[in-house]
Image (spheres, rainbow, N blue to C red):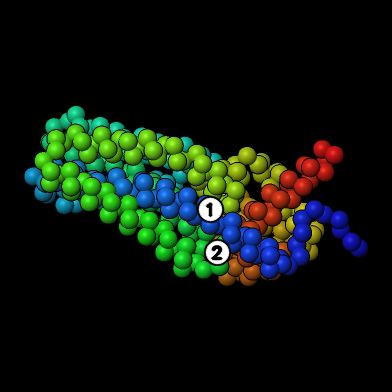
Amino acid sequence: MRLDCPVDVQAASPSDKTEKQASVVKPLAFLCLFIVVITFNSGLMYQVLNPAYAHHQWLVSWYWAVPYIIALYIMKNLPEKTNRTYILYVAIAMIGFAFLGFMTLDRSAASYLLVNTLMLGACGVYDLFWWSILGEMLGLGKNPARILGAGLSANVLGVLLGGLIGNAITASGASSYNPSVLALAVVCFTLILLPPLHKYLSALLKNHAYLTVLSEMSPAEQSRMADSFALVGRLTERESQIAALLLKGKTYRMIAGELFLSENTVKTHIKNIYSKLNIQNRTELINLMMEHQYSVQSSRSH
């Protein structure tokens, strides 16, 4: 029996693979630019903010890591339905308020706690954002090492530029508000970069936690997509269940717990799913789902 379905699960041609690899280049370049800009403030912080509070040595020596770790913990445990895109804008505002606080407040321990909490909390949010994006990109490029190296280089470059410029301003004897004004200008530039960055990344990584395409689809719609894959890819009932949970962003451990299976069994099923659909990772599964949804909607409109 032949099933007519708009989803093409045939093996990708060499030209398709080349096109997919090329599609990573522009989002990666834009992401690297964003990383340089956002980490510029980190370098500026090390050369300008921290030295200004150096007389609180006991506090500066350990507290800097606390808000960073707390931010990572909060982001990791946010409810599934939380729109993390908005949190990126909140983090930008936190950086801006940190430098405004540095400009207007005294150099007391309380001021340091406020400024550092805002700055390092935002750094935790953004580090998790761009590292997780790079992690998803590794499975899409021809050379994962180059993708990781590009992101890491952008991080180092941003911190280096911020540190050098901050050090130059400090060494020149310029008034203390100049670095903060520069940092606020960088914050404004970051706000300009974020919308197009989100657009590029959303087109490439439709299932990422910070990119909310999936949140627009109800659980019932996701289940219908999984049922379509079950027909086209000849998935078993169990594989169809696991595919539906993958589409909802569940981890291997969460799937194993929900279906009362071992993680190794879940991994085996997922390997079979990917093999039957001629895909390699969850990102491609989501892309396939979205292409199918678009094709179905187009056919209905005609």
Q: Quadrant of the N terminus?
A: bottom right
Residue beneath the point at 12% across and 46% down: 171
Horizontal relation, residue 23 to residue 236: left or right: left
The mark found on residue 87 in the picture is none
292 to 173, vertically: above or below: below
Mark 1: give few (<14), some (14-19) or many (20+) Cα within 10 Å.
few
The one nearer the camera, 169 or 130, is 169
Q: Position of residue 128 (x, y in %)?
A: 41, 51
**Label 2: few (<14), some or many (≥20) within 10 Å?**
some
Q: Are marks 1 and 2 in contact (CB under 8 Å)?
A: no
State the image coordinates of residue 227 (x, y, percent, origin top left): 76, 53
Q: How many marks?
A: 2
Identity of the residue furthest to the right in this view: 1
Q: Secondary structure at mark 1?
A: helix
**What type is the residue that disc 1 sits on?**
Lys
Q: Is residue 248 visible?
A: yes
Q: Residue at x 64, y 60 (%)?
A: 19
- The quadrant of the rendering that contains the C terminus is top right
Query: Which residue is found at the position 21% from the left and 46% from the top?
Result: 166
Which residue is situated farthest in the front direction here?
172
Separation of marks 1 and 2 at Cα, in angstroms: 12 Å
- Horizontally, residue 46 falls left or right of residue 72, namely left
Coordinates of residue 70 in the picture (x, y in percent) = 33, 47
Give the residue pinned by disc 2. 141
Number of the front mark, 1 or 2 = 1
Query: At which x and y percent is residue 285?
Result: 65, 57
Q: Which residue, given by chain and number where applicable, does mark 1 sit on?
A: 26
- Decide which of tag 1 and tag 2 comes sooner along the chain: 1
Q: Nearer the viewer, residue 82 or 152?
A: 152
Q: Residue at x 35, y 37 (%)?
A: 187
Check disc 2 and report its element: helix, strand or loop: loop
